[in-house]
Amino acid sequence: MQTRSKMLKKAFTTAFPYTIPIFAGFWFLGITYGIYMNVSGFSFWYPMLMSITIFAGSIEFVTVNMLLGAFNPLQAFAMTLMINARHLFYGISMLDKFRGVGRKKFYLIFGMCDESFSINYTADIPEDVDRGWFMFFVTLLNHFYWFSGATLGGIFGSLIHFNTEGLEFVMTAMFVVIFMEQWLKEKNHTSSILGLIISLICLIAFGADNFIIPAMLAILAVLSLLRRPLEAGGAADDDNGNSADPDGSGQHRMEIGESGRGGEAQ
Amino acid sequence: MTLAQQIITVAMVVLGTAVTRFLPFLIFPAGKQTPKYMQYLGKVLPAAVFGLLVIYCLKDVSVFTGSRGIPELISIILVILLHVWKRQMLLSIAGGTVCYMLLVQLVF
């Protein structure tokens, strides 16, 4: 029992620093969401229960509008599939990483929001830390931040007045850092560049509200077409070659120089 | 909407979200060999997805109105510089966010 609690503690203390930026972002967004529900006429029970059961930021904002509109469950379902379709990519990427983590797997999949996925995919988990519990705590902490923020926003609603303008940028900054971590680790930048450029083109072509699905399809199509050269060029070899490094210990710096541009494939 | 209708609506959203998260794991269960094509996608997709998420965060930035995306641009450049310099995740994120907040609150 002693060793188990030690192991859990270690996993928790390793996971926690990775989630600090998410705490800032989720409290800001969660409180905003709670306030939004509050001023839309819903009691705090709504953001509280919805943040626990749905746990996917953008669709929860959309759900507020659905609840205010006419009853249309099929449309609610279809809309959710569209907005959250990107999770399919996360699942495909985590098929191997979630292997062998036991019953926690169910919760890891249930709580796989953008942020949990990004941390769990890129984090360089030390050998002596249990991988399953690390990912579990990342997911649980994120879930808790979102839930507590949404609930507080729902309860205190319009009472909150402090100048947080611009705090939402914490999420953008985090994804830029995660993108860079991936960039610094990978041998071949084709996929990173494609992700940026295709998404940007689709954003311009389809607009902010409709670009995700076309971008996903285009990314899927181009990566499928490039399968042979990318596999030959080593872009697909890099199974565990990712790290986010919140302590800044710099233990991966060696590899950055070495990985070079070994797999220029096209 | 009645309470029952509200519960059904939220339940549909919960179900839809769960479908998008669980589907790959249901189609490719852990016990079976994952097709080579899916293994390939699992390895190359994340890099592209992180690019997509960066763009997704910036989707509501207008280049032609308001501050024209200049605070975003400056702050992202700062995040990149900080991260190349120190490679400390929290420092890069905090630096970029504080910079952005100062810019939108005081300058633009």
Image: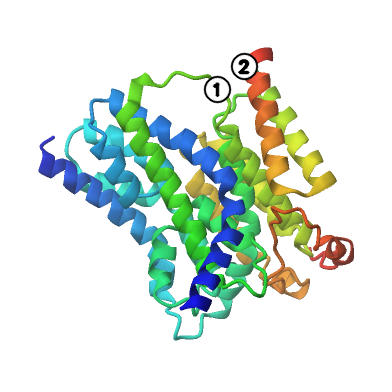
- Nearest to the observer: residue B32 or residue A230: B32
Q: Chain of mark 2?
A: B
Kind of element beneath mark 1: loop
* Image spot of residue B72 (x, y percent): 67, 29
User: Which of the 4 image quadrants contains residue A266?
Assistant: bottom right
Q: Is residue A149 left or right of residue A233?
A: left
Q: Which residue is disc 2 drawn over?
A: B105
Image coords of residue A90 (percent x, y): 51, 61
Residue at image position (54%, 24%) is A164
Q: Is residue B82 visible?
A: yes
Q: Residue at x 47, y 51 (%)?
A: A142
- Above or below, A216 relative to A94: above
Tell me which corner region of the image, top left, top right, bottom left or bottom right, holds residue A10: bottom right
Kind of residue sitting beneath label 2 = Gln
Amino acid beneath label 1: Glu
Give me the chain letter of mark 1: A
* Disc 2/disc 1 C-alpha distance (Å): 7 Å
| Label annotation for residue A232 | none
Q: Is residue B102 above or below residue A81?
A: above
Instruction: In the displayed orientation, state which residue is furthest to the front.
Output: A2
The residue that mark 1 highlights is A165
Question: Which image quarter: residue B2?
Answer: top left
Left or right of A78 in this view: A122: right
**Is residue B68 in view from this perspective?**
no
In the image: residue A71, left or right of residue A111: left
Counting from the top left corner in percent of width and height, residue A118 is at 58, 55
Instruction: Please say if the residues under marks 2 and 1 sit with CB atoms less than 8 Å apart.
Output: yes
